[in-house]
Amino acid sequence: MKLDFTKKKRDAQNTVEKKVNASDTNERVFDAFEVLKFFFPHLRKVDRIYPDVIMGRGKTGVTFALGISTVNRGNYSYLKQTLTSVLSRMTLPEEKDSVVIVSIADNNENYVKSVVDMITKKFKRQVTSGSLEVISIPAYFYPNISHAARSTDNSKKLERWRIKQVLDFCFLMLYAQPKAMYYLQLEDDILANKMYLTKITDFVHSITSNNWLYIEFSVLGFIGKLFKSEDLTDFVRFFLMFYKDKPVDLLLGDIFLVKMCTPGEALEKCIERNKHIRIRYKPSLFQHVGIQSSYPGREQYFKIINMRFQGFRLCLGLLFISVNAEFMDDSVEMEDFDENSEETDENELSSEIKYKTPKPVGEVYFTETFDSGRLAGWVLSKAKKDNTDAEISIYDGRWEIEELKENRIPGDRGLVLKSRAKHHAISAVLAKPFIFADKPLVVQYEVNFQDGIDCGGAYIKLLADTDGLNLENFYDKTSYTIMFGPDKCGEDYKLHFIFRHKHPKTGVFEEKHAKPPDVDLKRFFTDRKTHLYTLVINPDDTFEVLIDQIVVNKGSLLEDVVPPINPPKEIEDPNDKKPDDWDERAKIPDASAVKPEDWDESEPAQIEDSRAVKPDGWLDNEPEFIPDPNAEKPLDWNADMDGEWEAPRIPNPACRIGCGEWSPPMIDNPQYKGVWRPPMIDNPSYQGIWSPRKIPNPDYFEDNHPFLLTSFRALGLELWSMTSDIYFDNFIICSEKEVADRWAADGWGVKILIENANKPSIFKQLMSATEQRPWLWFIYLVTAGLPIALITSFCWPRKVKKKYEDVDFKKLDICKPQTKGALEQEVKEEKAALEQPVDLEEEKKQSDGEIVEKEEEGEPEEKSEEEIEIIEGQEEGNKANKSGSEDEMKEADESTGSGDGPIKSVRKRKVRKE
């Protein structure tokens, strides 16, 4: 509070306006770091707190400052590829209007030197222009609890690592705060999407409200978070209040609870208000690539392992289905068709299809098939892009009218984008302007990415009907009403539907983006097939987006676009100020608490381990990393754009034990207690979190019929692509979906028939896949052989079963008459046999085999008695389990009343054994 009061007093006295120069900027930077003295008492004795600037030209007044904090990860380093990705994917104007700040938050001198050397060689141009700065955080910035680098206690070590990480981000934010309008937080192990800064700029400009805390351009932790620089000091204050309690990404989420949710407010209401402030851009513009974490010894394989196993399971399942389906098809068709019959039928089908140029049926505003081979009515742009170097600002991309490369149809042609890495612009006037009134709008055309797509678009623009529309001057800033079609860069696959809505009060046009489709769009960009894109906008303010006549996105123009059509009715009063006596502190230090007399604050948190000994084989004079001797300079390396090439560094193979200057590890100091602080108690003067009062929005309006857009009278393609041979065909603009469907049946429908006719069978696809992936043969064999082996093992007939069938057949020949008493006695003995314990397997085999065989041979009396004696002898040897069965057998023998006693006895014993 004293620091804030002193600063306000100094600012009030300094009422004379003066020119802002470099020294003024430095003063503001020094003032930004003064906030640290409030939280870290050990810094209050330091005159001026400021990080060490290793490289930098003091660049300020730019739009974006990008912060990257880096630490030593041992044998791993991702900083070079991160900087290459971040800097190379900026345009030159964007590079001039931004500054990338690398903060080395590590006191290892060797690591600092390696980073500086790498940046000096690799990014010399950016350093010279001031677009890249390197700073180092001094060790005295950190309080004792987070200054330790090593510990024998893993939990404490992890806690200190998290604390230091929060502080590293805070120091970097304070340094970047006076340099730019916006601050983008990154890390040293990420990759940026192409044109990421352009997308960020466009998205920020599309947000009508300025009432947001930060924007998330990545869902990963603290990566890709965009802040307004004027808010950074508030964020830093919040982080420093709780830097010991939570990681920085969790603290970022807690800010919403503190700033937006007032005590007693319903949670649903608070969440609804947060939707307008917490904004997420989808999909993510930054991807985490580092496996080795900045926390020593931790590796981050989780997502990669999951993705690999999911892909393996999916691949195995599809292969199983495909192979079985192929086997089934072969078994059905084997009788009627030979090996070449399928190809013959396909060729016949292709020759039988006769193509005719589609003719529209019904009212249309525009059609184009390009089948004439001429660009009649189309105008090539002669304009130049603004704010772009002269050599790349010209729309000099080449267009041609050609047939498809694959599955071509005689007589069918399309418009083909032929140039790579160039700007293309071409347009044509509609037969009559389309006026939004009471009829639907239907826009439809075909696209085929014949060579795939790396980065580029295939969307169209419907150019607004304005007095100044000149197709020869068509360029990226020409006013349009609707933009629709596919677009892709990196792994970001999009299907745009954007319309420009006019603010009824200010007259300013705002872009409204439809929500992204809920389907995976990747295959439409990669399968090299012709796909049909359709947009339908209805007078009831609903829309539908279709691909290949299947709805992939639909919604309402009022509810399913970003930003929404109608602004909020109330906004926070910008003139409302928090009272000076407003107390937002929920907890305050206990003034009555007293520090214990034996509390020693002078002891450090960690000390060197005096018992540690330098390992044998440690090489003091060897570097930890050496240039890769097997690396080769890429053929497309441009020294002017990419800097001087150097081989990537790899771990030194000589450093099996260790290299560099050895120092004993640090261990926890048993005498350490830290700085004493009084306990916190509830603040009796707490008034809650203050928020400005709500006032009516002066710019509020309510448009309940946004379908009434600006009329348009031309269709244009204004594209840039890194891939050539993008095929366009069969454009149509009309008011009836049935008309568009008939048009599609005569054009796109014929292409689908040809593609299906020329599509190889599943068996051929599987065989072709093995040419580049021989290991698939193993999967094929397992997938096909396992079911066969299981079926064979379960269904193959067994010899034992046949043996018993023969025995049963012979028993019918031995059947002899019995008396009634003998039959009753046999039933009783069978019941008694069920209550007996099961005999050994060996005895069972004897009773089932040998005794029955003797009986069949016609010598039942003598042989069966010998068998009985053997069995009884075995039973006597195992009295514990067989005593009960012996008694029952004797009783059964005594109760036999017929004359065929020996034969009956054998049969009875056999029954009991079974």
Image (spheres, rainbow, N blue to C red):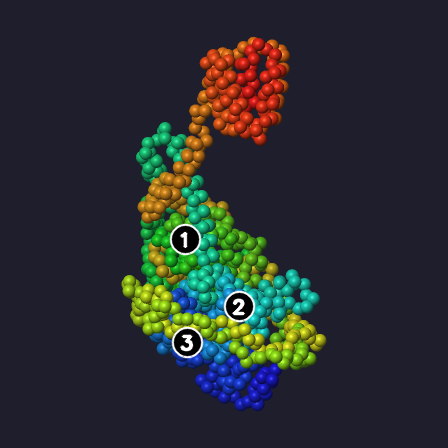
Label 1 residue SS: helix
For residue 134, the mark is 3
**Can residue 391 be seen by looking at this rendering?**
no
The residue furthest right is 684
Q: Amino acid at mark 3?
A: Val
Question: Percent x, y for residue 245?
Answer: 58, 69
| Residue at numbered disc 1 | 525
Which residue appears at 61% of the width and 75% of the height? 574
Question: Percent x, y for residue 712?
Answer: 48, 60
Q: Amino acid at mark 2?
A: Lys
Quick check: 437 above or below 27? above
Which residue appears at 53% of the width and 85% of the height? 45
Label 2 residue SS: helix
Q: Nearer the viewer, mark 1 or mark 2?
A: 2
Upstream in sequence: badge 3 or badge 2 = 3
| Residue at numbered disc 2 | 156
Mark 3 is surrounded, within 10 Å at the Cα level, by few (under 14), some (14 to 19) or many (20 or more) other residues, namely many
Q: Quadrant of the N terminus?
A: bottom right
**Can residue 911 be seen by looking at this rendering?**
yes
**Residue situated in front as seen by the camera: 374 or 552:** 552
Quick check: 334 above or below 224? above
